[in-house]
Image (cartoon, rainbow, N blue to C red):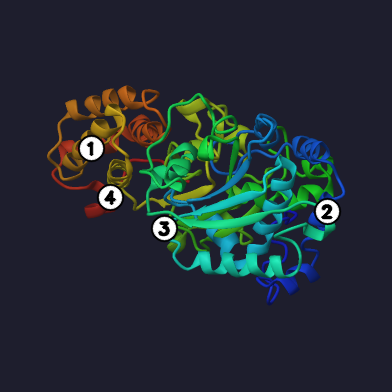
C-alpha cells in the first residue's frame, strides 16, 4: 500500500471544513513556510522533484525559478482548475472533498512567488465546486490565513475564483490567461512566456490543482523526504482518475513503483475487469495520450514490466510507449471498438479547437469525418493512409498542444490496431459491436 499525502484524510468526517482540516494537521505547513524565506521554500520545491501534474510534467521548482521579478510590478499565481481532459477528474475530487488542501498550497506558493493576488480558474461544467472553494476561502480568511498581514507575517494575499465557459482549450495556460482577462480563450504565441508576461502582462505562474495541493506536504516533509517516495525522475505520489471497463472506477493515489498490471487487477485499486472480460487496451494519461494494446501496456517492447510512472509509460517513445499525461486512466475490454473510440475522441478535439491555427481547425474536422466514414462501413483503405498523413500535418504545427493532442490518439490507434480499421473497411459492420469477436491477443 502506497503512502498517501493528498488523500490520507479524505475519509475523515468533516474534513471539508477548516476546523477538522486544521485538527488533522492542515495549515501547519503555512505556519512553517511563513518563517522561511522565499528562496528556502523554492529550494524545497526543487529538491522534491515535483513535476507538474496537469499533463506536461515540467519540474515545478524550475518553472517557479523562471518567474521574473521586476520592481514595482505585481506577480500572480493562477491555479488551473479547467480540468477538461476526457477521462480526468482527480482535481474535481480534491476541490470537492478536501478543498483546504488546495487553499493551503496556494498560500505557500503565493508567498514563495511574491504574489499578493491569486486566482483559481475553474472549468465551467464544475458548477457546484466554486461555492465549496469560496466557503473554504472565507473560512481561511476568518481564521487569519488570508487577507491582510497573514498570521502577523506582514504578508497579504487574496484568492479569487473565476469560472470558465466550458472550453477545453482554456486548459492551455495562455488561453486560460486570455479568458481570465475577459477575452476569447485563444492560446498566445510564445515567447514571451507567462513567467515574464502573463496575466495582465505581469509575471505569472500557472500550475494545476494537484500540483499546488502537493506544496503543503513538501514543506511539512521537506523536499528531500518527499523525493524519497518516488523512483527515478517520478517523485512523490500521483493521483489517477480510473474509469472505463473496471470494477472500481474512482480516484486513487499511487506511488510510482506500482506496476500497471497491479493497478488494473488488484482489489486495492481498479479491482479487475467486469464479467471476466479480457483487457484489450488502455489510454493511461487522459484522452490525448497514445492508446496502447494490452501486450505493450503490461510489458514494454523489450518485455520489461510497465510501471505507473513517467519514464516507464514513455519507454519506447510514441512507437511502443505512451505518457503519464494528466493521469486519466481509461481501460478498454475486449468488447470495445477502437475505431469508434478514436472517432469519438476526434469529434471532441474538433469541437474544442479554438480555430486559430489552420492545421488544427481544418485537420481535426477532416479526421473526424474520415473516422465516421470508416466506422459506418463506408471507408476505403486509402482513408487509413490519409488519416495518417493528416495527423502528421497537424502535429507540431499549431500554437498550442491541442493539435498534438488530437493527432496522437489517431496515430496510436492506426499504429497498433490497423487491422481493426481494415475490418471496418472490408465489412459493412463493426466487428466488435455486432459480433463480439476479434483477432487480438487479450491478456
Give the number of the disc on residue 205: none
Quadrant in which residue 197 is drawn: top right
The residue identified by callout 4 is 432
Total numbered labels: 4
Distance of mark 1 from mark 4, alpha carbons?
Answer: 25 Å
Secondary structure under the numbered disc 4 in the rendered image: helix
Where is residue 427? Give x, y as percent: 15, 41
First in sequence: mark 2 vs mark 1: 2
Of the residues tagged 3 and 1, which is closer to the observer?
Answer: 3
The residue identified by callout 1 is 365
Residue density around tag 1, few if under 14, some if 14–19, many if 20 or more, within 10 Å: some
The residue identified by callout 3 is 124
The residue identified by callout 2 is 153
First in sequence: mark 3 vs mark 2: 3
Secondary structure under the numbered disc 2 in the rendered image: loop
First in sequence: mark 3 vs mark 1: 3
Up-down relation of residue 302 to residue 280 (above or below)? above
Distance of mark 3 from mark 4, alpha carbons?
Answer: 35 Å
Secondary structure under the numbered disc 1 in the rendered image: helix
Tell me the residue at 57%/57% (across/down).
Answer: 160
First in sequence: mark 1 vs mark 4: 1
Amino acid at each position: 500500500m502506497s503512502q498517501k499525502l493528498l488523500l490520507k484524510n479524505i475519509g475523515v468526517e468533516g474534513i471539508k471544513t477548516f476546523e477538522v482540516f486544521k485538527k488533522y494537521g492542515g495549515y501547519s505547513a503555512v505556519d512553517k513556510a511563513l518563517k522561511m524565506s522565499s528562496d528556502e521554500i523554492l529550494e524545497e520545491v526543487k529538491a522534491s522533484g515535483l513535476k507538474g501534474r496537469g499533463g506536461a510534467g515540467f519540474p515545478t521548482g524550475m518553472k517557479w525559478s523562471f518567474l521574473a521579478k521586476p520592481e514595482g510590478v505585481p506577480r500572480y499565481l493562477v491555479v488551473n482548475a479547467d480540468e477538461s481532459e476526457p477521462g480526468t477528474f482527480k482535481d474535481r475530487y480534491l476541490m470537492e472533498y478536501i478543498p483546504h488542501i488546495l487553499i493551503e498550497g496556494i498560500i505557500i506558493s503565493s508567498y514563495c512567488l511574491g504574489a499578493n493576488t491569486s486566482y483559481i480558474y475553474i472549468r465551467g461544467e464544475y458548477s457546484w465546486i466554486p461555492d465549496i472553494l469560496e466557503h473554504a476561502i472565507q473560512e481561511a480568511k476568518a481564521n487569519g490565513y488570508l487577507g491582510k498581514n497573514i498570521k502577523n507575517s506582514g504578508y497579504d494575499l487574496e484568492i479569487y475564483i473565476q469560472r470558465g465557459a466550458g472550453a477545453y482549450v482554456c486548459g492551455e495556460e495562455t488561453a486560460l490567461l486570455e479568458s481570465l482577462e475577459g477575452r476569447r480563450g485563444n492560446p498566445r504565441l510564445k515567447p514571451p512566456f507567462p513567467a515574464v508576461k502573463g496575466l495582465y502582462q505581469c509575471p505569472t505562474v500557472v500550475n494545476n490543482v494537484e500540483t499546488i495541493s502537493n506544496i503543503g506536504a513538501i514543506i511539512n516533509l521537506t523536499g528531500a523526504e518527499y523525493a524519497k517516495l518516488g523512483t527515478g525522475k517520478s517523485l512523490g505520489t500521483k493521483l489517477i482518475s480510473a474509469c472505463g471497463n473496471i470494477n472500481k472506477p474512482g480516484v486513487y493515489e499511487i506511488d510510482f513503483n506500482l506496476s500497471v498490471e497491479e493497478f488494473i487487477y488488484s482489489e486495492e485499486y481498479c479491482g479487475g475487469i467486469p464479467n471476466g472480460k479480457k483487457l484489450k487496451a488502455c489510454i493511461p494519461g487522459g484522452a490525448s495520450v497514445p492508446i496502447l494494446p494490452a501486450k505493450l501496456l503490461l510489458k514494454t517492447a523489450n518485455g520489461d514490466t510497465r510501471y505507473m510512472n513517467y519514464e516507464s509509460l514513455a519507454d519506447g517513445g510514441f512507437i511502443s510507449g505512451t505518457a503519464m499525461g494528466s493521469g486519466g486512466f481509461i481501460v478498454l475490454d475486449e468488447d470495445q471498438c477502437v475505431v469508434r473510440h478514436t472517432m469519438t475522441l476526434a469529434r471532441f478535439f474538433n469541437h474544442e479547437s479554438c480555430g486559430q491555427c489552420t492545421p488544427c481547425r481544418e485537420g481535426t474536422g477532416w479526421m473526424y469525418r474520415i473516422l465516421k466514414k470508416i466506422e459506418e462501413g463506408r471507408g476505403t483503405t486509402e482513408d487509413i493512409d490519409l488519416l495518417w498523413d493528416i495527423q502528421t500535418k497537424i502535429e507540431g504545427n499549431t500554437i498550442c498542444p491541442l493539435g498534438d493532442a488530437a493527432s496522437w490518439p489517431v496515430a496510436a490507434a492506426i499504429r497498433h490496431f490497423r487491422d481493426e480499421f481494415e475490418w471496418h473497411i472490408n465489412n459493412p459492420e463493426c466487428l466488435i459491436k455486432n459480433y463480439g469477436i476479434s483477432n487480438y491477443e487479450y491478456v
